[in-house]
Amino acid sequence: MLTYGPREIRALLEALEAAERRKPAQVSKREVFARHGLLGSKYDRVFTAIMYKMFRMQGVLDRAVAHALGVRPEDVIGFEPMLRQALRLSAYLAQFDETRDRRLISALLRHGLPLLASRYGWRKARLVHKVLERLIDEPWKPSTREEEFMARYMVPIDIVIMARRVVAGDDELEKLLDAINRPPVNSVRVNTLKASFDEVYKAIRSSGLYAWPSDRVEGVIRYRGPFNDTLARLLAEGKIVPQDESSAAAAPLLQPRPGEIVLDMCAAPGGKTTHLAELSRLQARILGFDIYWDRLRRMKTLVEATASEAAVAVVKADAANAPKILGRGSVDKILLDPPCSTTGGLHKNVDARWRLTRRKIMELQELQKTLLDAAVETVKPGGLILYTVCSILAEEGEDVVLHALEKWGNLEIVPLNGPYDESPILPGTMRAWPHRHGVTGFFYALLRKKG
């Protein structure tokens, strides 16, 4: 039976504070626990489990804290960092901790309040006791359908509200919210510059994995099971690229041809870039732009591993400046997969999801519009732009394309006829759905610049 003293409570609160401030959270947490002599101990295991659950349900905890204190959920973010985490911890222990560890609650009050008071004063420190007391007596409950979905699927309420636009009713919305929390079926793309599909497929099947060819995207193998030694060897040899099926569906829509200049505007880590090179049999000139050196280094490694160097130029550049760098009307085709909310696969973002507010989505939309404008300026008359985002939200997909169509009178949609479903909002564009297709959610629009 664990007992909790001042050292343990201080370590837990400092770890929560550090993990929110500096990513990756796992590294920050380990540094704090090591400093307090808890790394690898039973306390480490118990506290790590608590922290993971708290990060996963952060938005729900903020609503519970707000309920207990009589403030708005967004006001919780305004509390000082350690106090904010202590309030969330008290809400978790009072209402959501399945172990109902009364020893930890008592220790938080006995040792945590003096620590908080030394930083922020007793008036603020006592808020922790108020949250514990209120939630034990009167637990928080969802008051709207949106809050109910938020609590059930651990999805930010703004995302729940915005996702309603793209689905047919609450039944499908629930299926979508459930699906984006689950990893899609694993998949790899065969690099036919270095191996045949049959060679790779047989090797994967022979390794004991249950695998099958994608019936929607040529060259993709889907499988169930771990990333085993055979897959690691094939990756090291450049014969496969780990890539979700819906991501691998993008490059074939652009159909790069020999002699064309193709710009991948936000290219790193290079999965789509190397796919473009492969599809052109190294006969197109592929320019891969990105602004981050670490991502460009990873991309360069992938380009070399896949034997794509003859076609791909890795360029550190801001894609928004593409018209100035390359010249207006200078590129045959453009693939634009800009920064987005990644709501098509929230399973990858346990805690980062709670930073996704409507304001953040609209900030991303402005960047997406800017980059699509740059693409329109850079592509040749008659050239094609493929706009994709791994987002389930119309604000990042259909709305961005509609804005470009309204702004630029010389753009038209080239209708996509598969492999996924037509967008319910913008005819001719396409969506891959986690709940229908078992893939990361994606939006696709193919645009032609008339001329």
Image (spheres, helix red, strand yellow):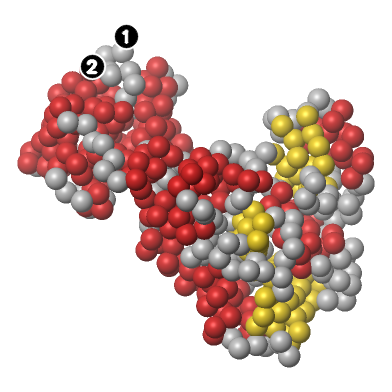
- The residue indicated by pointer 2 is 103
Give percent across and percent down for residue 43: 36, 20
Residue at 67 percent across and 39 percent down: it is 185
Residue 1 disc label: 1
Residue 44 location, quadrant: top left
Instruction: Name the residue type under label 1.
Output: Met
Count of labels in the image: 2
Q: Residue furthest left?
A: 123
Q: Specify the amino acid type for callout 2.
A: Arg
Quarter holding the C terminus is bottom right
Residue 208 image point, x, y percent: 81, 25
Q: Which residue is drawn at 33% across and 37% down?
A: 16
Secondary structure under badge 2?
Answer: helix
Is there CB contact under 8 Å for labels 1 and 2?
yes
**Quarter of the image that includes the N terminus:** top left
In-image side of 377 versus 352 (left or right): right
Whether 101 is drawn above or below 372: the answer is above
Q: Percent from the top left, x then y, of residue 160?
A: 42, 51
Please identify the quarter of the rendering in which residue 11 is found. Answer: top left
Q: Residues within 10 Å of mark 2 (few under 14, many from 20)?
A: few
> Looking at this rendering, what residue extends furthest in the bottom direction?
451
Examine the rendering and report whether any part of residue 315 can be seen: no
User: Compared with residue 336, is residue 50 higher up or lower down, i.e. above or below?
Assistant: above
Q: In percent of the image, x 23 and y 17: which residue is there?
A: 102
Vertical side of 282 occupied by 237: above or below:
above
> Residue drawn at (89%, 69%), measured in percent from left and top?
283
Q: Answer with left or right where residue 311 lies relative to residue 376.
A: right
Please indicate whether residue 169 sits to the left or right of residue 121 in the image. Answer: right
